Amino acid sequence: MSKSNLTRRGLLRNSAIAGAGIAMPTIFTASSAAAYTNEPTGSSVTLGFNVPQTGPYADEGSDELLAQQLAVEHLNGEGDGGCLNTFTSKALKGNGILGKKVEFVTGDTQTKSDAARASAKSMIEKDGAIMINGGSSSGVAVAVQGLCQEAGVIFMAGLTHANDTTGKDRKANGFRHFFNAYMSGAALAPVLANEMGKDRRAYHLTADYNWGWTQEESIVASTEALGWETVNTVKTPLASTDFSSYITPVLNSGADVLVLNHYGGNMVNSLSNAIQFDLLSKQVNGKDFKIVVPLYSELMAAGAGENIKGVLGSMNYNWQLDNEGSKQFVKSFGEKYGKPPSNSAQTCYAQVLLYADACERAGTFNPCGVVEALEGFEFDGLGNGPTLYRAEDHQCFKDVLVVRGAQNPTNAYDTLEIVEITPVDQVTYAPNHPMFGGDDATLGECNPGA
Amino acid sequence: MLGLNKKDFNLLLIVMALALLAPFLLNPFPSDSGLAQFNAGYPDLMQKFVIFGIFAIGFNILFGLTGYLSFGHAAFLGVGSYSCVWMFKLLGYNVLPGIMLSVVTSGIFAYLIGIVSLRRSGIYFSILTLAFAQMSFALAYSVLSNPKFNLTNGETGLQVYADDPQIFHSASAPDLPHLFGLSMRATEKLQIGAWEFQFNAGYYLCAIIMIAMFYLSIRIFRSPFGMMLRAIKSNNTRMNYTGLNARPYTLAAFVISGMYAGLAGGLLSAMDPLAGAERMQWTASGEVVLMTILGGAGTLIGPVLGSGLIKYFENIFSKINSTVLHNWFSFLPEGLEDLMVTLIYPFVGKGWHLTLGVMFMLIVIFLPGGLVEGGQRVKRLFKRRKSSDTDDEATQSTPAE
Amino acid sequence: MDAIILQTLNGLDKGSAYALIALGLTLIFGTLGVVNFAHGALFMIGAFCAVFLQRLLSLSTVTIDETQKDFLGNPLKVETPYVHNWFGPETGAAIIDWSVPLAILFAIPVMIAVGFIMERGLIKHFYKRPHADQILVTFGLAIVLQEVIKYFYGANPIPTPAPDALAGAVDLGTLVGFDPNVIIYPYWRLIYFFFAALIIGAVFAFLQFTTFGMVVRAGMADRETVGLLGIDIDKRFTIMFGIAAAVAGLAGVMYTPINPPNYHMGMDFLVLSFVVVVVGGMGSLPGAVAAGFLLGVLESYASTTWATTTIPGINQIIIYLVAIIVLLTRPRGLMGKKGVMEE
C-alpha cells in the first residue's frame, strides 16, 4: 500500500468529519433501514480479519494477516493484481467490490473461542464488518462460524482442519477452503501403503480434544482399510510440553509406525521428543521405524527444524506447487514480503478473493446472495488447481498434497518437499458421511440478519 | 436511603449513572473520525464491562474483605456458563432459568470447593483453589467432552444445536437468547450528527443486574457480617481466641463470591450462547485477581474500574493495526509518519499484551491502592488547591485494611 | 518392568526441570520473602540466551550465488557464518554445533546481571508491600519480558538442537542385563538430569559449607538479628537473587535441546512450579527439590496406558490431585515451616 494513498484517505476522512460537524444534527434510528446486517452505504466496504495475534499461533496469524492485506490490495487494483490475473472467474475488476473500495479491520482471536467471538463481534457491531475471515484452530472456526450465522454475516474460515467445521457444525453462512482431517487420511493412506507396505502396525499419539479425535478417527479408518493394524491410540493432554512419557511406551509396543495427531507447539515437541529417542533409526518387525505427522504447516516445520527430515504429512497448499495461480501468488507475496506464503496464508488470501468474487457475481453484499453465488462454484487459478465449493456442506474440494521433510533443504523455505498430489476424486466423500455428522448435519437457512 | 448512608448512596448513584449512560459515555468520538477506534460503546464490549464488573465485585467480597486470595474463581464462572447453556439446550432460549441455575450450580460448586480449600489459609489456600480450577478446566476441555458423555463439548465450546430438546421453545420466540421475547441482541441505534449510539437490550439487562449486585455488595460491606470478615482479615488468630469460629463466615463469603462469579458466567452465556472451556483456565482466574487489585482491592468501586480497564485494553488496543496508525499520523510528513508508526506499533495490535504488562507495573509501583487511590489523589489535589485545610477525607469507601 | 524403569527416568527428567525452577523460587522466597511470578520468565530468558548465542555464532556474510535460484527465481543469497571464515568451515561448524553447551558460560553472567537488575531496580521496593502487590508487579514484569522476547524472536518455537555428538539415545538396558533396544534413553535427557543434580548439590553445598551461605541461612531464619549484628544482609540477599536467577536460567539453557524454546514457555512452567513449591512447603529448599522430583515421577506414571484406562483423564489432573491430597494431609506441604505465607 503506497503511503501517498493512505495520506489521501486520511485527508478525505478528516474533511468528512469537518463536514459532519457543520451539518445539522439529524436524529434517526438506523436499524430499520438496512436490508441485511452492515449493508455498506458509503463508498467503501469493510472486511473483518480475525487472526491470532497473541499466544502460540501469533506467527501463523501474522502470516494470514499479510495475505489478507495483499488480497485487499489486489481487490482495490493496487500492486500487481496477484491472482486476479489467473482466477478463472473474471468478475473482479480491481476496482474494489461492486465499485466500493475495500477496507479492513483486524482483531485478535488469541486462539480462544471466547476471545475470537468477542473480537468478531466487535468488528461486526462497531466497525460494520460484512464478512469475517481467518483463524488458526477449529475450535475458533466453529465458534466464530456460529456467531456469524447468528449475526447475519459471511464467515470465510482460515486454517481449520477438523471435520466438524463443515461436518456436524456446518452453517449456511460459513465456508471452508482449507482441507480437513478426512481428506488428510484419504490422501495419506495410499502413499503410506506405497512407501511403507500394507502390513504396518501403527501407534497413535493424539491431542486430547476435538480436532485430535477427528484426525485420529480419519487416519485410523483410512489406514486400516489398507491393511494396517492400530496397536494403540493414546490421548495426550493439550497442556503437555514434554512428551517423553508418551513416547517411551512406543518403544516396546511392537508398533513400527508412530502417528502424531498433534498440531502447533504440541507437534513440534512430540516430534522432537520422538527423534530424541532415536525412533527413526530403530528396526521393528524387521522394518524401519517411521513417523507420520498427518497435518503439516510451514511454521511447525521451522519449529521442529532438522527433526522433520523424512517425516510424511499432508498439506492444503505448498508454495512449490507448479501451476499458474500458485506461481502468480508466490510472486506477489514473495516480492512484497520477502518470503514465500504459508498454506494458511494462501487459504486466507483465496477466501478473501472468493468472497469478493461471489459478491460481484451476485451483484450484492447480501449474505444470502453470496451464499447462492458460492454454492457449487467451480474455479481455478488461486493456487490449488481446479476447485469446487460444494453446495451441500460449503467445503472446498481440490487436490491434497502429501509432503515430506526434505533431506537436504537448500534454504529455509524448501524444508518440505511435495511427494504426491492426491487427486480430488480420491479425497471426496458424501455430504452425509458419518464422520461429518451423518444425515443429521444441515446447513440451516442462510441468515442475512437485520 | 435504601439503607445506605449518604456517601454510599451517592456512590450507588454514580455507578447507576455510569452504567445506564454507558452508550453515551463510551462513544465520545464521532463514528467516522480516526479516534473512533477508541470508542467502546458497542454492545459486546459494554456487556463485557458490566459482566466482568459483577465477577470482580464478587471476587472482592472474598479477597477484599477476608484477604483470602482465590486463584480458582474462573471455575465458578465456567460452571455458571455451562449451566446456562444447558438450560438453553434443554428448556429453550429464555435467559431467566439459565441465569438462575448458573447461580445455584456455582453456589453448590463453591460450597464443595470451599469446604475443602478453606481448611488451609494463605498461599496454601490459593494453591488449593488453583488446583481445583485447573482440574475443572482439564476435565471440561477434554475428558468431559468425549462422545459418550458430552457435558462440555470441549474445545469448540458448548452450544445449542437444532436437535436439542428446547421443550419450552415456542415458534414466536426469537431463536436467540431472549427475556420473554425480548431478544438480547436487539439494538436500537441513535444517530446524532456524526455520533452513533447503540442501546442494546442485553446490555441493559446486565447493567441492571450489575447495579443490583453492586448494591448488594455495599450492604455486605457495611453489615455486621462484613465487619466480621474484615476482622478475619486483620487478625484471624485473635478471632479464634475470642471464641469465634471464623470458618463459617469465610465459607459464606467464598460461596457468595462464587455465586457472583456464576452469575457473571450465566450472563456471558445469556449474551452469547456459547461456553468455552478456556473460561476456566488459570489465566482467567488470574485476570479477575488483576482486575480487583488494579482497581483497588477492598474498595467498592475499584473492581468495576479494574475490570473495565483490562477489557478495554483487550478489545480496543488489540484492534489497532499498522493501517490504522498510518491513518492517524497521515497529517505528518512522510518520514515522521513512519517514525511515529514504528514507535507505537510494538505497543498496539499484536503487542497489546506488552502495554498491559507495562500498565500493571506502573499502577502497582505508583498507585499501591489501585485506580481508586489514583482517583483519591487527584481529588485531594483539587481539594488542596481550593482550600488547604481539609485533606485526608476518604472520598470513596474506605479500604478494608 | 522396563516400562516402570523408563517412566521413572522420564519422571526424574521432568522432575529435574521442576526442581530447578522450584529451587530458585524458594531461594528468592526464603531470602527476600518475595513471591516472584517472573521466575518462569527467567527460565525462558535462560533458554533464549541459548537461542541468542546460536544466532550470534551464525551471523553471516552474504554472497550472491548466480548459479542457484531462490524461490522467486532471483539469484540465491548464500550465507556463510563469520566463524566459518575465521576458524575454517569445520571448526566453525563445530562451534555452532556446540552453541547450547557454550551458552551455559554465556548465560551465567547474563542471568546474574538480570537478577541483580531486577532485584535492585524493582523487587527491592516491594519487600514491605503485600504479597498481592508482589504477585501483580512480577506478573506484569513477566508479561513485559516475554513480549519483548516475542518482539525479537517471534512466537514460533526455535529449534536449538544438542551437539551432534550428544544427540541420539543410549541403550541403557544392555548395561544392566536387559535385551537390547528395551530401555533406551536420550543422551541429552540423561545429561539434563545429572546437570540438575549437580546444580542442586552446588547450591546446597554453597549454603551449607561457606561462611556466606551460613550468613544467608541465618538471615533467612532471622533477618533482624543478623542485621543488628552489623552484617549487610541486603547485599547478600541481592546476590542470592542473582544466583536464583542463574539457576532458573541454566535450567532454561539446558532445556532447549529437549523442547524448542518459545516465548511463553515460562508461563507454561510458572503455575506448575508454584504448585511444586507449595507441595514441598513454602520456604523449604529440600522440600522444593523433593516435590519437584515427586511430581515429575507421578506425572510420568499417570500417563501410562494402564493409569489412564483405570482412571480416565488421570494424566490431565494428577499434579493438581496430588497437590490437594498433600495439602489436606500435611497442612504446610511436605517440609514447610509454620507461619510462612499462611496469613
Image (cartoon, rainbow, N blue to C red):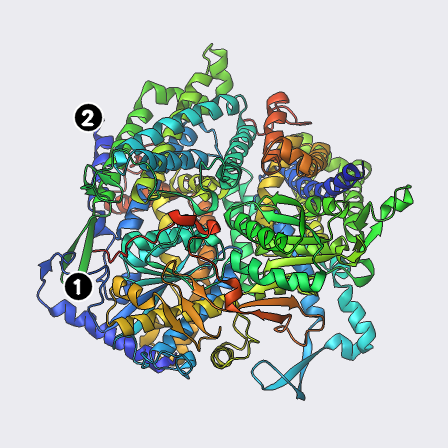
Q: Quadrant of the N terminus of chain C?
A: top right
Question: In front: A130, or A88?
Answer: A88
Disc with the residue nearer the chain's start (1 vs 2) = 2
In this image, A309 relative to B167: left or right? right
Residue B187, given in percent of the width and then of the height, sits at 20, 50
Residue at mark 1: chain: B
Q: Residue at x 35, y 44 (%)?
A: B161
The residue at which mark 1 appears reads as B194
Q: Residue at x 71, y 73 (%)?
A: A408
Three-letter residue code for mark 2: Leu
Disc 2, SS: loop
Q: Residue at x 35, y 56 (%)?
A: A120
Residue at mark 2: chain: B
Measured Cα–Cα span from mark 1 to mark 2: 40 Å
Residue A291, given in percent of the width and then of the height, sits at 69, 57
Crowding at dot 2, Cα within 10 Å, few <14 / some 14-19 / many 20+, comes out as few
- The answer to whether residue C159 of the structure is visible from this angle is no
Residue A119, given in percent of the width and then of the height, sits at 36, 55
Tell me if residue C33 comes above or below residue A66 in the rendering: above
In this image, C329 relative to A196: left or right? left
Three-letter residue code for mark 1: Ala
* Disc on res. B2: 2
Picture quadrant of residue B316: bottom left
Assess whether mark 2 and mark 1 are in contact (beta carbons under 8 angstroms). Answer: no
Picture quadrant of residue A363: bottom left
Q: Nearer the viewer, mark 1 or mark 2?
A: 1
Tell me if residue C102 comes above or below residue B19 in the rendering: below
In this image, B258 relative to A46: left or right? right
Question: In front: B387, or C23?
Answer: C23
Disc 1, SS: loop
Crowding at dot 1, Cα within 10 Å, few <14 / some 14-19 / many 20+, comes out as many
Residue A282, given in percent of the width and then of the height, sits at 80, 55
